[in-house]
Amino acid sequence: MTVLSCSNLSYRVGDAQLLQGITLSVQRGETLGIVGPNGSGKSTLLKLLANLRVPGQGQVLLHGQALRKMSQRNIAQTLAVVEQHADTHDSIGVFDAVALGRTPWLSALSPWSAGDTAIVEQALADVDATHLRNRTWRGLSGGERQRVHIARALAQRPQILLLDEPANHLDIQHQLAILKTIHALPVTTLIAMHDLNQALSCDRLAILERGRLMALGKPLEVLTTQRLQSTFGVQAHYLTDPFDGAQILRMCV
């Protein structure tokens, strides 16, 4: 079942055409990776799909309904986004920052409850940040802040999770741990990423180049040596890991 889609999506800033004619659909439960060189439009596409930007042309559908006609509250109850350069007010504590993810579910008739506290605690545990719960935002490293932002999105309990370079600023251990957590979540995930070997673990990949969708399909089908040369400017070949038989890309310029 298609849960999120866009058709003929375009976006321009001044004379710069950042996206042009993007059409794709995302299926329930899949992990769709979005890859491409710097400036290819990955972040812009995620912002349009998250309703953080208004497209110049085309439309986005969330569960078959036009995104622009939905309330922000309804969107936030279905879809959460982790931006690459998100920030939070300096004086806020970590627990309170993650608790912001519960905002779409709170109202006068549904105030904060023990269930909300449990959800925040679980979100912190999922990103290995329970030990940070009593820290302040200003005292966190860049990698710790990134983990807290992901926890905030998880606390939102979305059906669809959009992430822009979620492993950015993280050391290798937490990169692998966060990506493992994301892949294990019972949600539909769109994830923009640079590491092509990590991208191989996605169900499908969308390859962008200069604002256009160049390929869409299973990783090994679209990340061909020809595509890697033409889009990414690298020579590459696949190796087979003798430990588990996984395919690994080796690249050079």
Image (cartoon, rainbow, N blue to C red):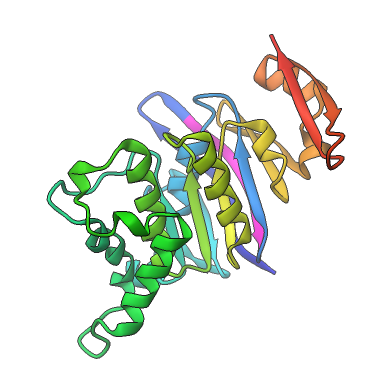
Residue 124 drawn at (x, y percent): 39, 61
Q: Which residue is drawn at 83% across and 33% down?
A: 241
Specify the farthest residue to the front. Answer: 131
Specify the farthest residue to the bottom. Answer: 109
Q: Does the magenta stretch include residue 27?
A: yes
Q: Is residue 156 visible?
A: no
Q: Does the magenta stretch include residue 105?
A: no
Which one is in front, 123 or 161? 123
Residue 42 drawn at (x, y percent): 52, 37
Quadrant position of the N terminus in the picture: bottom right
Quadrant position of the C terminus in the picture: top right
Q: Is residue 41 visible?
A: yes
Number of marks in the image?
0
Q: Is residue 253 above or below residue 20?
A: above
What secondary structure characterizes most of the magenta part?
strand
Which one is in front, 158 or 137? 137
Residue 246 drawn at (x, y percent): 82, 39
In the image, taking residue 247 as reference, residue 153 lies left or right, namely left
The quadrant in which residue 33 appears is: top right
In the image, taking residue 62 as reference, residue 30 lies left or right, namely right
Q: Is residue 71 above or below residue 8?
A: below
Magenta residues?
18-28
Specify the farthest residue to the left. Answer: 91
Q: Which residue is drawn at 41% across and 34% down?
A: 169
Q: Which residue is drawn at 66% across and 39% down?
A: 199
Q: Residue at x 26, y 62 (%)?
A: 95
Residue 172 drawn at (x, y percent): 53, 35
The quadrant in which residue 13 appears is: top left
